[in-house]
Amino acid sequence: MEMVKRAVNFGCVLLVLTIALTGAANAQDSNYWSTAYGTRSQLLGGVVIGSPGDISSVFYNPGALALAGPTELLLAGNAYQYQKISVDNGAGPGRTLASSSVGTVPSLFAGEIPLARENRIAYSFLTRRSMDMELERRTTEGVESLVPIANPVFAASEIQLRQHFSESWYGMTWAHLLSPTIGVGISPFVVARSQNTRGALLAEGQDAAGNVAVGSLSREFDYLHFGLLARVGLSGVRDSLTWGVTVTTPNLSVMGSGNTQYNTTLTDQTGTIGNVIGADYEQDLDAEYRTPFGAGAGASYGWGKTRLHAAVDWNAEVSSYTVMDIPEFTVSTPGGDSTVHIVISERLDAVLNWGIGIEQRFGPTWAGYASYHTDLSGRNPDDAPGGSMTHWDLNHVTIGTTMRVKRSDFAFGLTGAFGKEPVTALANQPEGGSTPSNLVTKVTMLTVVVGWKISF
């Protein structure tokens, strides 16, 4: 009976660690406000839906572009991010599985095509979400509970989690001046979403009699999807008050395809369970990716050299849908063949976020900024992992400054975001399976903002 439980637990460990590790890596995957764009807008944390417009309006509020100042080109808007990911007890009881990295987080590239004052056309490219991460752990200590053999005198394990994804938006913006104080605009975007996720666990053990058991589990899927969506905005100004509202359509699927790789192997010399083997490799499966309907509103008010900004952003529920449906395949066991059917699905709850920011001008060419906004996850923690695997409720704080030198605006700032998430037991877990206890994933993100914008 102990041997059976260990074999079942072996599969459960991989699934739980995939939830924990991918959750840490995928901190943006079910969140909507993890990235800000532009120079001044980045330092305000994106709390600019109803604020005076610049070239970043192509994303935040296309209507505000009609009220913006001179033609602009955002030549650089990169953010350099330090990220630390850790899983308490992820490498065994009392052992933390951790990884840290420093990389470039692409932001927004945008420019304007000069036309008549009443109609303005702009182009833009932005990275809505992205991650490039690998977590690995190899050890021969403290992993006796992971190996599929009873009372091992030797145990070793390898854990791997790889998560790469990118969601890029390519768009054009049209903005029209309805009156000297009101602008309307629309930004249609092509959305390209690519994702690759792999989780693998290799565990091997030997007992006192010299019997060996080796178990290997790997799960991997990748896909590329193209869709269309649009952001529509209305913006206005009255004396020291500015305001704005936006609507974002769900994406219209154009095409998508993906691949899957699944492999399960257990070699058991004790004969207690026997050998288990099964694999399936599929290519060119239909793939689906959906984004929610969204709406936002914001305002700003200025007095003297100070301006206060505020915004709310709501994203509707995404009903359950199938990302990829893997055809049935067979796993051979001593008790007979077993048919396996895997469906990768996705569902997101409605989310309401809010934020505030303050802008202080210290002179005609120098200003300081501070902001705070929530970044709640749309994923229900009770749902099984699927297209997204994390439930992070993050809080973002940003400080920074802008300086104007002739026609150029330079922005420098720092953003901090922190979160942690206990890993709950698996739903519909096999009888005899157990979840590793006290698994807690933690993420720390520190982002250095560097922006450069030029006016013509």
Image (spheres, helix red, strand yellow):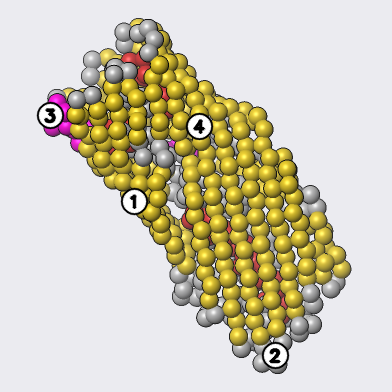
Q: Is 98 left or right of 427, judged from the image as shown?
A: left
Q: CA distance from mark 1 to mark 3?
A: 29 Å
The amino acid on which the numbered mark 2 sits, given as a three-letter code, is Gly
The spot of residue 446 in percent (x, y) is: 34, 51
- Where does the magenta region start and end? 351-368
Mark 1–mark 4 CB contact (< 8 Å)? no
The amino acid on which the numbered mark 3 sits, given as a three-letter code, is Gly
Q: CA distance from mark 3 to mark 4?
A: 36 Å
Q: Is 286 left or right of 411, judged from the image as shown?
A: right
Mark 1 or mark 3: whose residue is earlier in sequence: 3
Residue 363 bears which disc, if any?
Answer: 3
- Which is nearer the eye, 429 or 409? 409
- Which is nearer the eye, 315 or 368? 368
Residue 446 bears which disc, if any?
Answer: 1
Check disc 1 and report its element: helix, strand or loop: strand
- Which residue is the site of mark 4? 169
Q: Is 120 left or right of 51, judged from the image as shown?
A: right
Check disc 2 and report its element: helix, strand or loop: loop
The spot of residue 223 in percent (x, y) is: 64, 44
Check disc 3 and report its element: helix, strand or loop: strand
- Which residue is the site of mark 2? 210
The spot of residue 166 in percent (x, y) is: 52, 42
